Image (cartoon, grey):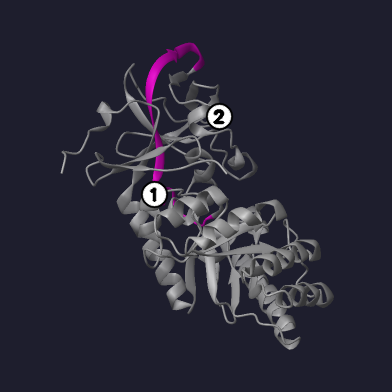
Amino acid sequence: MAEPTPLHALDTPCLLLDKAILRGNVARMRAHLDGLGVTLRPHLKTAKSLDVARLAMASPTGPAIVSTLREAEYFAAGGVRDMIYGVGIAPAKLPRVAAIRAGGTDLAVILDSLDQAEAVAAHARASGDALPVLIEVDADGHRSGVAPGDRDTLVAIGRTLTGSGAALRGVMLHAGDSYALSDPDALAAAAEDERVAAVTAAEILRAAGLPCPVVSVGSTPTARFARDLTGITEVRAGVFMFGDLFQAGIGAVAVADIAVSVLATVIGHQRAKGWIIVDAGWMALSRDRGTARQAVDQGYGLVCDPAGRPYPDLVVRDANQEHGIVAVRTGSGADLPDLPIGAQVRILPNHACATGAQHDRYHVLDADHRVAAVWPRINGW
């Protein structure tokens, strides 16, 4: 095995991943859900890496959920056999789904309308493929899904599918409004609302004589704060394994549990303005400014030393394409650290998914903050 690479030998900007923190985050979530009697189906949309997936999944074959068919193809080629494509199915994508399934992967799709169900039914009749389907149910008005009490629509979709040879596998929900919360009791209440909505929809299908073996819920905040998951068979969550500043603002992770960071180099100063200039702009960090809506605005990222220790109130205040402007948070009495040209910093991201999407690999850190491995990751659709 090659000797670990010190950070100073890396070209910047680049994406770092602390393997020990990643493992700890997965272990805590799995223990929490085991205690509630449900299966974890990790969402791989943040990871986009087979090496990460193998740490997150219960086995090398799954289960998992993905957000793009590019991910489904990539993970299927890597041996993952139990997946959900977690975005509402477009009829034109059904041949691509069929090709993945023909390779031996049990890839399920989701939908929330009779039009989609009819397209899937036509595909099942024409192909003979018993395509598994989950009906997306609206947990909280956040985005997509059938209302949990809409018996007519749920039953009509279910009967359309089962009458065609497609396999009605169950229901799935995503409590997206939980991302706007931060109080633990409010997050627990959101998790309970999600559970009740899921069970309500499942009971409607079963009362109509339709199958509903899978009752799937999930988001990192509700997974973290759920107290009772009676009636639920699995929980989906993804960003929990990496963490980010947005999730820290919610309270779903601690800043110390953020496993990814962007390594950057100091390339200039504007001392009269109190600025340090680094070579990581929004192309490396992403344009995500989600923490601007939270109690603590983290700018474009929280700045740490090479060991991952945050400097007091030091953030990337602004970002151009390839330049990051580092400064002390507005209103803080903290001192600007003395970081000479060539010094390296690590920047914790607002949104791990968006920052990860700017990079094609993880530089995986060992306990001494050296790079022990490089793990490829994918992008695209």
Answer whether residue 270 is magenta in the image.
yes
Answer whether residue 332 is magenta in the image.
no
Percent across and percent down for residue 328 are: 48, 28
Nearer to me, 244 or 328: 244
Which quarter of the figure has residue 231? bottom right
Q: Is residue 191 left or right of residue 19?
A: right
Q: Nearer the viewer, mark 1 or mark 2?
A: 1
Residue linked to disc 1: 256
Residue linked to disc 2: 330
Q: Is residue 244 left or right of residue 110?
A: left
Nearer to me, 29 or 372: 372
Label 1 is placed on what type of residue? Ala
Label 2 is placed on what type of residue? Thr
Q: Secondary structure at mark 2?
A: loop
> Quick one: which residue is furthest to the right in this view?
152
Image point 60% across, 68% down: which residue?
A: 217
Percent across and percent down for residue 219 are: 57, 60
Q: Report the span colored magenta.
A: 251-273
Compute the Cα span from label 1 to label 2: 23 Å
Q: Is residue 10 above or below residue 174?
A: above
- Residue 139 visible somewhere in the drawing: no
